[in-house]
Image: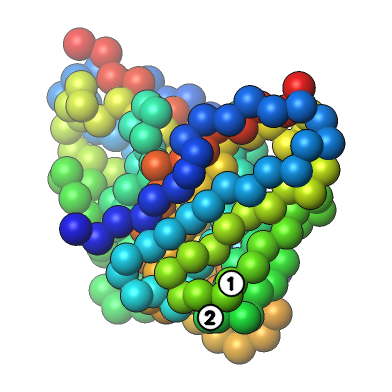
Amino acid sequence: EAQVTQNPRYLITVTGKKLTVTCSQNMNHEYMSWYRQDPGLGLRQIYYSMNVEVTDKGDVPEGYKVSRKEKRNFPLILESPSPNQTSLYFCATSGLAGDEQFFGPGTRLTVL
Amino acid sequence: AQSVTQLGSHVSVSEGALVLLRCNYSSSVPPYLFWYVQYPNQGLQLLLKYTSAATLVKGINGFEAEFKKSETSFHLTKPSAHMSDAAEYFCAVSFNAGGTSYGKLTFGQGTILTVHP
C-alpha cells in the first residue's frame, strides 16, 4: 500500500530540547516537503527537497532543519524548539514537483 | 511570487444545496491548481487538480472546479451537498518551471464547510 508515514504522531516537549520528526514514503517519489498548519493560516511550506541531497527553503524555514540522505526519508529537525513552533506538521511527497502531493497523517507538536 | 486567497473562512449550506467555495490565485507563470479536503483529525486528500488541460475539472465525490484565467479564479462547486462533505477545504497553487519557486506549493487559508440537515 502506497503511504507516507510520520513519527511520532503526537509529541509534547519543552523549550530547547532537540527533536526530530521522521517522514518516510514507499512510493519512490523524488519530491518531499514539510508543512505546518496553523488555524486561519492554512498550510505553510517549511522546506522541500527535489531529490537526495537537494533541499530548499519554503516560506517559514526559521528554526527548522532538514536532511535528505535517502530518497524515502525526509526528517524534520528542531534544534531548539520554542513555543511558537507548536503546530500540526505534515510531510508530503510527489513524483514531480508541481504534481499532486500525497500527505502523511500529521504530527501534532506542543512545545511548552 | 505566487499566492492564493480563499474567500470566506466558513461556509454553511443545507443538505442538498449548492456548494460554492471560492479561490483566487496569483502567479507570474501558468499555474497548476489544486483543491484538497481535510476531514477532522486527518491529513489532506486531493479532490481535483488543474494542470493546463481542460478548464473544467471533475474530481472525487461529485466536486468540480473551473479554471478561469481572466478572473484568476478556481472556484470549487458541488451541485448538492451531503452531510459527509463537512470538512475543511484548501485551494493550492504551484507551477512546474525553472526558477527559485520550482517545487513550491502555496496554500490558501482554508474554508470550513458546514452542512446542515
Q: Earlier in the sequence, mark 1 or mark 2?
A: 2
Q: Nearer the viewer, mark 1 or mark 2?
A: 1
The image quarter containing residue A18 is top right
Horizontal side, residue B12 vs residue B69: left or right: left
SS under mark 1:
loop
Q: Residue at x 57, y 75 (%)?
A: A69
Q: Residue at x 39, y 51 (%)?
A: A5
Q: Cβ–Cβ below 8 Å for labels 1 and 2?
A: yes
Q: Which mark is residue A85?
A: none
> What amino acid does circle 1 point to?
Arg
> What amino acid does circle 2 point to?
Asn
- As measured in the structure, the alpha-carbon distance from the residue carrying label 1 to the one carrying label 2 is 7 Å
Question: Dot 1: within a 10 Å radius of its alpha carbon, few (fewer than 14), some, or many (20 or more) residues?
Answer: some
Q: Which mark is residue A51?
A: 2
Q: Residue at x 73, y 48 (%)?
A: A78
Residue marked by disc 1: A68
